[in-house]
Amino acid sequence: MEKAQRTDIATLGEFGLIRRLTEEISLKNASSLKGVGDDAAVLDYAGKRVLVTTDLLLEGVHFDLTYVPLKHLGYKAAVVNFSDIYAMNGQPRQITVSLGISRRFSIEEMEELYAGIRLACDIYGVDLVGGDTSASLTGLTLSITCIGEGEEGKIVCRDGAKENDLICVSGDLGAAYMGLQLLEREKSVFAGEKDFTPAFEGREYILERQLKPEARKDIIVELDKRHILPTAMMDISDGLSSELLHICRQSHTGCRIYEDRIPIDYQTAAMAEEFNMSLVTAALNGGEDYELLFTVPLDRHDDVAAISGVHIIGYITAPSLGAALISRDGNEITLQAQGWNSLAEEPDPTKEEPTINP
Amino acid sequence: MEKAQRTDIATLGEFGLIRRLTEEISLKNASSLKGVGDDAAVLDYAGKRVLVTTDLLLEGVHFDLTYVPLKHLGYKAAVVNFSDIYAMNGQPRQITVSLGISRRFSIEEMEELYAGIRLACDIYGVDLVGGDTSASLTGLTLSITCIGEGEEGKIVCRDGAKENDLICVSGDLGAAYMGLQLLEREKSVFAGEKDFTPAFEGREYILERQLKPEARKDIIVELDKRHILPTAMMDISDGLSSELLHICRQSHTGCRIYEDRIPIDYQTAAMAEEFNMSLVTAALNGGEDYELLFTVPLDRHDDVAAISGVHIIGYITAPSLGAALISRDGNEITLQAQGWNSLAEEPDPTKEEPTINP
């Protein structure tokens, strides 16, 4: 028997693998408007835009039950899907929840998980309409698909940014990442001990950002109120750098952002100092912020600047200028995608990175 | 610290757990027409019916890569989702595919898996529009969500069967289950050997039914051509008994089916004899047939009987008569759900069994 070729998946990484698997896919149905490559797929049902996004969470890869309470896990798993729908300027309406459950879990624990999912659904006005539940040989598997609704002409993709557009982000960045660092440190400190009750005083904000993030529905509402339709938008799940590069690549542009404009919370900065980590790296590459990154035409400057919690951090340029950060001392630093990439040994920032509704 | 209550999930089983987790869920959005409890959820987007179903497949629980080629796995994983949409009298249009991949898989193997998914999409006219790809610590995880389209007034649920309706099934039953028995036996015979090439001559049909099932789009087309709208319908994934009990429970009816009317292929019968297994048990409880089970009003007898591949196996009764099989020798045997239930130690047929779009 001839030996089949075997190439390690690590040589491609997550984005490379997705590109390889999906590059020849063409859409056949009239109702399939947009497939792989944005926060959500866009479907057309009777003129209504239907948005679909999906997320697979595996124990030990995406979450650690040593310090993540099941209710928080459920809440976060639901919210990160809603965030993808908002990032298309849509409204999440339904989710399906599939669970793979190993024998070490009890009914009460699964009720805790569901309580978190249902709380998120209640707060964001989303219905849980289906799913699949099964045994798992190892750990917990959670797969959530979210269906949302958008209006024709108002769906915002990643490919619409234009030269001179303003680059905006909501909230602040890097906090969820620093929260994770803190949890990981406390976990190693308390390793082997039964009661995991470290002192988290004064770090509540970064912990909440990691354990119980929210989706920025409020920003979508504010933009709509002011009749601002972003030219491009996505949510920041893999880190600002990675997401900005997606927008630039898909919009065929470059960009400049300013280090001193990147919004960072006090607790994030304090934690970075304690860990002796670069604050700008945490903010650029930390990920899991679930804030909105979007671009608007320059003439909407005053309107967008008036929205509480929105920061203008830079502008879109011609593609030839590349994507760069202007540091506090005025140096230009090329942006690299060092976002979380669970399939690669080392992320390769020189590779093109198509995405499959991540 | 007070010790939390811990109840084994096995005490409830899959259906019991789903009921526990979802019983208090009420739908809030106008676009959520029908949630947990049928083959697919039913949504309303601008008057169009959007159907959503999802399936989670875990290595070692739902498939065994010792004898399941990855291309077949991909094909089957897609087709079983299409089957759920057809079972609502809808047309599958889009799928999302989420993959959790452990390090032992190569890029080429994932291409094989995708080749199967894409072949199924091509044959059934479905678009792959998104997904999520990630590392897994253990084995392969595959989560597929399918979105389909239906017409208002033509969606067929499980709860519409009426007294005296005819009970129909497409194709034949028990073959996929006997195919699985054969594969399991050959696996144990060849255990430890590197080349797994058993002689499967004369068993091609039952193996194909297990490894490469098809969804009965053709039956949906035939029913539509003849203007037959079933009163209830579902696909047979857990076994005829289990599915019939779902229809009876949700329609508040009883039923009678006849042993000698249950369609069974010659290879299925031969294999059951070789294994010394009860043929009727395989047909009633085997599962994974992905045939359609549906009910039609009595006055459509001649029309439905004229469809090639459809068998009338019994009729719907008043609920007080219960659900029973009339054996060849005229005895009445109460139907019990012994379908596959990966979460229970022993299935409990006396329990009510709500489902979550399985």
Image (spheres, coloured by chain):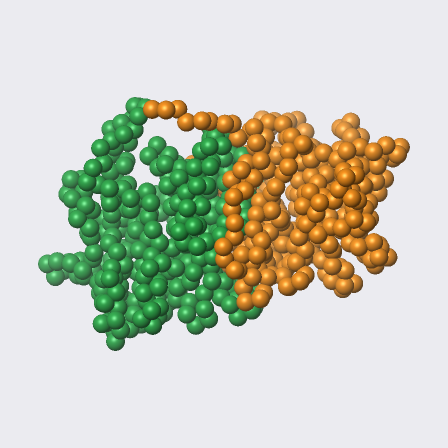
Chain colours: A green, B orange
Image location (x, y in percent) of residue A323: 25, 62
| Residue sitting farthest toward the bottom | A299
Q: What residue do we see at 24% from left, 31% from top?
A: A198
Left or right? Give the position of A294 relative to A70: left
Front-most of A92 and B136? A92
Image location (x, y in percent) of residue B100: 46, 43
Image location (x, y in percent) of residue A13: 39, 48
Residue B180 vs A223, above or below: the answer is above
Front-most of A306 and B266? A306
Count numbered badges in the picture: 0
| Residue sitting farthest toward the right | B329
Residue A261: image quadrant is bottom left
Left or right? Give the position of B353 relative to A233: right
Front-most of A354 and A44? A44
Residue A72: image quadrant is top left
Q: In which quadrant will I find the N terminus of chain A?
A: top right
Q: Is residue B212 visible?
A: yes
Left or right? Give the position of A214 relative to A21: left
Image location (x, y in percent) of residue A186: 25, 32
Q: What residue do we see at 32% from left, 65% from top?
A: A222
